[in-house]
Image (tube, coloured by chain):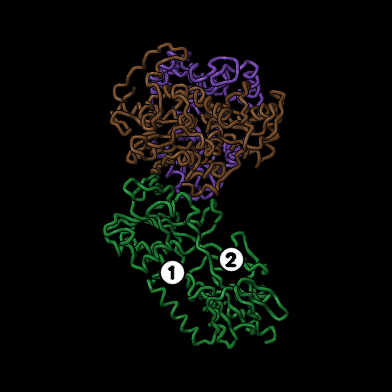
Amino acid sequence: MTDQWYDVVVIGGGVGGMQVAIALADRGHRVALVEAHADLGGKLLGYAKLFPSFENAEQVVDELKNQLDSSGVAVFTNTKARDITENTKGYDVMIENADTPFHGRTIVLAYGFDIFDPTLKEEYGYNIIRGVYSSVDFEKMMKEKSFSKYFGEKPQGFGFVHCVGSRDEKVKNNYCSKVCCITAIKQAMEIKEHYPSADVFCFYMDLRLHELFFEKLYKQAQKEYGIHFIRGKVSEVANSQQGKVAFKVEDTLLSRPLRIELDGLFLMVGIEAYKGKFPSLKLPLNEFDFVDPGIETLATQGERGIFFVGTTKGPRSIKETLQDATYVSMQVHNYLLNHGK
Amino acid sequence: MSIFFEKYSKYIPDDHFWFARSCIRQNFFPGAEQRFLKIMREKLKKDVYDSPHHTTCTGIGYHTDIVHFETIMTVIARQFALMTEDGYENIAISCVTSFGIYQDVLEKWEVEPDLLEKARRYLKEATGREFKLPKAAVHTSDIIFKFRHEIASQLKYPLINKLTGEPLRVVDHVGCHYAKMFPSKGIGGAEYPYVLAGLVEAWGGESIDYPERRHCCGFGFRNYIVKADRGYSLTHSRIKFESMYPFKPDLILTNCPGCNMFMDRWQYVIAETEGKTYGDTPGYGIPVLTFEELTALVLGYDPWEIGLQMHQVPVEPLLRKMGIDFDPAGRYYGPDGTFLGKPEKPSFLKIE
Amino acid sequence: MSKSLVDELFEDVHVRHGLEACINCGMCTSVCPAALVYDYDPRVLVNLVEKRDEQTIEELLKSDYIWYCGECMSCTTRCPRNNSPGEIVIALRHLSQRKGLFIHSARGRQQYAVLKTVGGSILGKGYCVYFDDLTLERFPEQGPTWDWVRKNRHQILNKVGAAYKEVKAGPMRKIAESDLAELKKIFDVTGGSELYEIIEEKSREVMKKEGKDEESYFNEVYESPVK
């Protein structure tokens, strides 16, 4: 299993890790992929459908797994990297509950991201107020088809709260998580399909829809699905005596403070830097604990033979992570060639 | 609901406090301040010094904008000087507006040391006094919170409804200036403050959440002081009453004296103008108590020495629920037994 | 050359501490008590200040708009940019009074009533409010029980342990002349007395211009409802 030398050890079996492993194996390198959990797929395993096409997340994962199977990558699940140290020819990757490390001439870190913990936004009462859930909970409900278990057959309305844990100095996350606005629109459409007579609201500060076809989805949500878009950040949440979610928000376009009661509120939780660390590895991190983009220039990336993929560097969509993984694989390949392979 | 308690546990000293009185509490609930001192000294055996030389912090003047920052910070500096000269390093603040101002001044001094130097110069020039910064500036409700378990061990009347055997349903209202400006300076933070809920839970009661719990009582400073604007103040208390009413509270508990006064008096005004009351018996209001008054009640002090006869909404329904042994007629008599007559009965709000 | 209003405003400690930059999320307005009952929006106020436009600021200082806020600071708790509209209001109100612009608005003129009541009580008694001044005439909402307390004040206050008008420690004590003198000196040295004088002087200008005596002017600004 271990004590073998690989050209590349990829830490993390999410979409980024899988893609970079596949690309490098295709170029003839010896690649090991280590994944802490029992299954490959990372955060994608929690999603039902993906924006903007509504394709199944499962399909994306399966496609990558198939390619992985035929690529010759040595895959190790239930294998958690706990530290990484340098040696004369490359790196040792220490594994939890295992004696022998992996050896790699290069390391690709694809450990992904953490989801913002919504309990930190105390005013939303996550885990305290009945009817308050996160966007992650939403995906679970979609996969399990369990909405009626939480909301019954005839809920009156739902709200999606944008920017929970993002663009917020109170929780020290003064950045945009990029993918939540389009996710909220997707989820709003999904729940409207499930409960056509319910009123569905998106409470946003700005709508950041960065990809080509996102704007069309927004219009579709407004025109065909009747989703209401209110420009205002939800502040205080409580339960009414009937158990509904009662909250306050300003419709900033009308300069009007509103008090609304709905059956459910979904918090669009942001992307945060992964908090697990490799104690011996000094990573160049920026103020938000993401890996510093400064190392992404061709000149500096991989000077030490360490490379970073996807959301280790900041919020990204799945599409962007896959593109990034391909790009990084090229850099790893060049590094290996230049360093006497 | 102590979810955020550990995250927001601030330092509260154990003993040796210099007491800073509250304008509103002194004038509307003087018994409450005296009970606090009595409980601290007699029940908890603590040293609390009551200086005759301190003045108002001018907080209401500051928030009605006739006193500006440089003046108020120097008045605060004088209080600190008196505290230093009296040999204390902990200040126990009775008023919540005042508490907010102490935190605000201390924070601005910390971020701008030049301001602190200016305060020292001003104070020296005006009074010749010098001061040290306090080690702790806490609200008196923080102190009672800290010793809530000690008080629980001396309880005479727990917060149980003797008529039903159920815990009393207590709505708390924490003053805005307690935690909204500096959540880390409030026990439990700003969203789920625990300073009053902790007392309720320690003494056997049930703390009730309701949608407008965090809404301001409506003091609004100038919006009350100026008679013309007083509708603002009434409106916001009313919003709170309408929101808490379906949850059937037995008691409203406050730590800010202004909030206590408003929530007591506005119930009377709503009863007289709309014929509407919020207590569980028609025509009765919900008793509103300051935390010192409640602490004194559970420890067995006489309601009329605490000063509960000064409240407009009668407290007798609560006293009976708690099974407190009291003389119903006692409220009409002076300390020497003189009969004081009875207050005029409002047309709608029932009083005893 | 005198400073512009914009410069003076932005030098105020409250603006230094309370104004970062607004992203118009509306969290402040959604919980603001004043926004609920008046045609007022703290977010809009902050936006107007951020324009850093001399004419806009001057208009604000002369308008009712800056006088709706109740300074509860509910707006401060959750602002994702660490702004405090309430603090900015304090700065605006201070500047409006210092420059004598408060007399141009009906609500601004009410500051005269505040000065005479709270202001007088602070320097005259050492309290922001004092028992003797809390009459049913001025405060009818205090109710009949309060009236009864006032009628039986010595007995009742004695019973609860107050030190009403006594020169010793205790609630409602008479604050000693020497302490009041120090308080006055603090006001003199820090510009607090000057602020009082400006409010008084400017209000008198209005009284003179409109031919009103002090009592009727006080009653007008104290009691007349403003839209």
Circle 1: element type: helix
Check disc 2 and give the amino acid type: Gly
Q: CA distance from mark 2 to mark 1?
A: 20 Å
- Which mark, by number, is residue A3? none
Asked if labels 2 and 1 share a chain, the reply is yes
Depth check: B72 or C195 in front?
A: B72
Circle 2: element type: loop
Check disc 1 and give the amino acid type: Gly
Asked which quadrant contains residue C171, the reply is top right
- Crowd rating for badge 1 (residues with CA inside 10 Å; few <14, some 14–19, many 20+): some
Q: Is residue C195 above or below residue A107?
A: above
List x then y, in percent, for residue B233. Answer: 41, 31
Residue receiving disc 2: A276
Would residue C109 be seen by someone viewing this image from the given angle?
no
The residue at the point 57 percent across, 14 percent down is C166
- Crowd rating for badge 2 (residues with CA inside 10 Å; few <14, some 14–19, many 20+): few
List x then y, in percent, for residue C147. Answer: 40, 17
Residue receiving disc 1: A46
Asked which quadrant contains residue B123, the reply is top right
The residue at the point 48 percent across, 30 percent down is B299
Would residue A302 be seen by someone viewing this image from the given angle?
yes
Q: Colour of chain B?
A: brown
Q: Colour of chain A?
A: green
Instruction: Give the chain of mark 1.
Output: A
In this rendering, position of residue A323 left or right of residue C35 = right
The residue at the point 29 percent across, 28 percent down is B283
